Amino acid sequence: MKILFLKYGIACLLLAVTFLHLYFVRTKNLSVWKGGGFGMYSTAHHNHREIWIRAGKLGAWMPIDSLGILPNSLEIHKSDVLRRPFKKNLEKFGEKLCNFKNYNSIELEIWQPDLASNSGGFQKNRLHTIQSHATKP
């Protein structure tokens, strides 16, 4: 019985962990660099993700870096959004950015580069788009 477990049980356990990781990567935006790192060599690093911002409904889209240097608290939230691009993190960052820049509302998008399977080049995929509003202190 022990030999049977060693022979098949450990392999089945490793496969289960792999498939769970892949499931969370596809459905919950778990970073492929986390949880064992399955597939981390097949994606770009999270530093290559981009956050784009538009102030108001009629404003032009611009990269977040065009706002200049942000205070440390916002930089921490920005890097958290880039590492873990969950909608909740993006909403929290948008709210803090609205309050810092005195915007009534903004739209934020986070984009990630991926390999295009048909051409072999890179393409950008939008992960999330959110609208944030300033909160009263």
Image: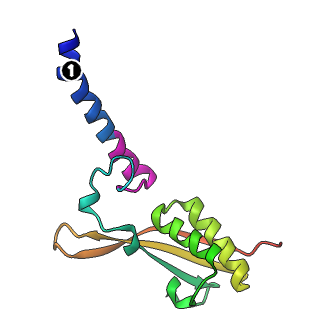
Q: For residue 18, which quarter of the picture? A: top left
Give the farthest residue toward the top.
1
For the stretch drawn in magenta, what is the main secondary structure?
helix
Compared with 54, 86 (above or below) is above
Q: How many marks?
A: 1
Q: For residue 99, which quarter of the picture? A: bottom right
Q: Is residue 43 left or right of residue 131?
A: left
* Nearest the eye: 77 or 116: 77
Q: Secondary structure at mark 1?
A: helix
Q: Position of residue 52 (x, y in %)?
A: 50, 80
Asked if residue 93 is among those painted magenta in the image, a careful observer would answer no
The residue tagged 1 is 6
Tell me which residue sits at (69%, 85%) in the image: 101
Q: Position of residue 72 (x, y in %)?
A: 62, 76
Which quadrant is home to the N terminus? top left
Asked if residue 30 is among those painted magenta in the image, a careful observer would answer yes
The three-letter code of the residue at mark 1 reads Leu
Q: Is residue 113 left or right of residue 29?
A: left
Q: Position of residue 56 (x, y in %)?
A: 65, 85
Q: Is residue 68 left or right of residue 3?
A: right
* Magenta extent: 20-32
